[in-house]
Image (cartoon, coloured by chain):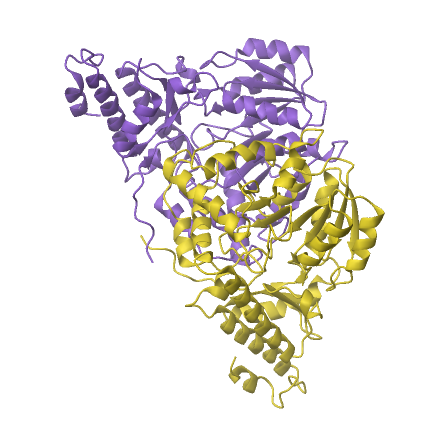
Chain colours: A purple, B yellow
Amino acid sequence: MDLQIRTSPILLAPGPTEVDPEVLRAMSSFAESHFAQPFCNTFGDVLTMLRRLFQSQDPNAQPFVIGGSGTLGWDFVATNFIEPGEPVLCLCTGYFSDAFEMCLATYGARTKRITVPIGAAPDIHEVEKELKRVRYKALVVTHVDTSTAVLTPLKPLSALLKRVSPETLLVVDGVASVACEEIQFDAWDIDIVITGSQKAIGCPPGLSIIMVSSRALETAKARKAPANTWYASLARWLPIMQNYEKKQSSYFATPPTQIVHALHASLTSILSRPLEERFEQHRRKSAQVKAVVKALGLTQLTTESEYQANGLTAFWLPDGLSSKELLSRVTEKGFTIVGGMHREVGHQYVRVGHMGYSVVGEPERHIDCGLKALKEAVAEYYASRSGHVLPGEDRGPVGLARASL
Amino acid sequence: MDLQIRTSPILLAPGPTEVDPEVLRAMSSFAESHFAQPFCNTFGDVLTMLRRLFQSQDPNAQPFVIGGSGTLGWDFVATNFIEPGEPVLCLCTGYFSDAFEMCLATYGARTKRITVPIGAAPDIHEVEKELKRVRYKALVVTHVDTSTAVLTPLKPLSALLKRVSPETLLVVDGVASVACEEIQFDAWDIDIVITGSQKAIGCPPGLSIIMVSSRALETAKARKAPANTWYASLARWLPIMQNYEKKQSSYFATPPTQIVHALHASLTSILSRPLEERFEQHRRKSAQVKAVVKALGLTQLTTESEYQANGLTAFWLPDGLSSKELLSRVTEKGFTIVGGMHREVGHQYVRVGHMGYSVVGEPERHIDCGLKALKEAVAEYYASRSGHVLPGEDRGPVGLARASL
């Protein structure tokens, strides 16, 4: 029995991402009992490997792997670590930061947003002022907001908290950053990172992955009211994760066994090389994408390079070119990129994902070929508008299509 | 690239279950965007097929497919349809019914349990008395409790509600019954059925599947307080499901694209033949398993046949034989069955699953061979105890192992 034959375009979305054939193979592993020893071994290894991915050596910190999407991690944070009425400061850099804040508010947190213009990162001085004004239970930051490609650096926030509000939990949405941007969980005193399986980790979607510091675990245990959740309950999942890491079965809800196998395969691949090398590969590939966007005369949502994500690029569309047209031209050339994601200006920009297997998978040239398709698509558009030429080109698309990437 | 070579035992657990090779193949489908048209088509078809699986023709009823385990369906019920303080009557026939009640209570429902001795089904007269005493918002029944293999017939409960408490919602946990026991969603006036992908539906675990009647949708819409959940929010998922069924993309959280493909493959297979035929196959295979258990001189937890599940069999261990020993003997013969699941007597019984692909997959003889392994394992145990012979056998295990199944 063979795996499927590829008929779909190469996926250069900011998640889900292309998957290593070894990971895809693990997705089709045979049915097995979540109580059986082989599965306990696999799940146990996954949890131990996650500690390494987060660069954590604290045995009292705890990784969690739960069936669900990355979004479920927001519920996990909102229900276990924050009690109704507690103040939470949210740094909002796009759709996902806004939604995380809404999730927290749904469960009763007293949230305060620091918002920024589209493509900007939060002003750390404003954050400092706010942290001095109110004693926040948590500072919630979306490391990379997938909707705008804005990266908010974590290290300065960590240092700021240490200085002005050391009791505030540092909560990170790392859905679009874990495994493509550096995160030093212990060294940066991070309390919670949530992510999903399907972005830079390079696994199919279906797992919510959460890393929790020993301090945050103590906070959850010390809460006054019981957590108002069942499926997202830390108290119920904690013994399950502890047992599985000891390679003993334990039950709260059936884990998606095949995706856990796939995660095992992707983590094994990720950790077979130094993490710093992986992050550097993403920085290099990101710079290449951003250079092509610039060469096409297009502007990123984020203009300052220190706030530009390394796993995706978001750029404004050329005047007159619709997102639908560009996406469809690129799809015809065999690649999927996606539209913008913003209530007001979503239709005015597009996003290219460059993370995980498409960046680090040696035999593939997804990004190079995808960039070529993007350049051709933009060039075709310019060519279709008589009298328009590409910036830096004196003759339309033909030269461009030939240009070496 | 080939799929994995099988090295693990055949899984005869009451979920996860063995998976059709076509479904496994779909699990390894290439990465694709959840916004792209091909995925919208697949997801749309899945939702439409689910209506057929539930035998519902009400266009205003709504199937939901959400990344997570079957357990998440409990949160979906507890947060969207029941308001804090509302009375809910729970029929408790095992671990899962008890846990569903605990989930409801966690979210503030005023729950009342009707409990039964191990292996018994609820007394309908007691249910009637209780329904007349209190005007319950919902009657919650676990169609088949996977922990005890007790089946609680739905049709009489539906008729009872119609007669004495027509406003009470009929909520069914169908995790271990959907696709192996008859469920007529419309005809039996069921309001909510929850299930998971990994049991009789024959797909790997990872999807929470929920069918909701138009009446229950109205109830959810009319609630006074907003639902106290984010990830399990009906209000947020409803437009997503409606759009996907129209084959239009829509976003709330990233769906596990590969498992949705697998569900598409399993539903396509299920619906390629009349459902009644499928249910009959399960009844027949179940009778065969139960006959073997009886022939071994062993007793089921449930003694009355009308309350015995057709997708699994739970039976008490012979005196002196531990669950661990029996399971290990069966595993050595290439099959996985599982232990009991009950706080007090879990170690005194075991469970054999017989649902989905292992029952209806024509080329396989999982159940027949698994029964042979079970018979041999029990016989070996008897043989190991000198002086003991199998009921109905005058010479220990050899004859038994040869017996035709």
> Looking at the image, which residue sits at the far bottom?
B394
Q: Nearer the viewer, residue A149 or A52?
A: A149
Q: Is residue A93 above or below residue B319?
A: above
Whole-percent x, y for residue A160 in the image? 58, 15
Whole-percent x, y for residue A251 in the image? 63, 51
Whole-percent x, y for residue A382 in the image? 22, 17
Residue drawn at the location 52% of the way across and 20% of the way down: A155
Whole-percent x, y for residue B191 in the image? 64, 46
Q: Is residue A39 above or below residue B192?
A: below
Residue drawn at the location 49% of the way across and 73% of the way down: B369
Residue drawn at the location 37% of the way across and 47% of the way down: A22
Q: Is residue A220 rendered to the left or right of residue A127?
A: right
Name the image quarter holding residue B63: top right
Q: Is residue B93 above or below residue A332?
A: below
Residue drawn at the location 57% of the way across and 77% of the way down: B375
Name the image quarter holding residue B385: bottom right
Name the image quarter holding residue A294: top left
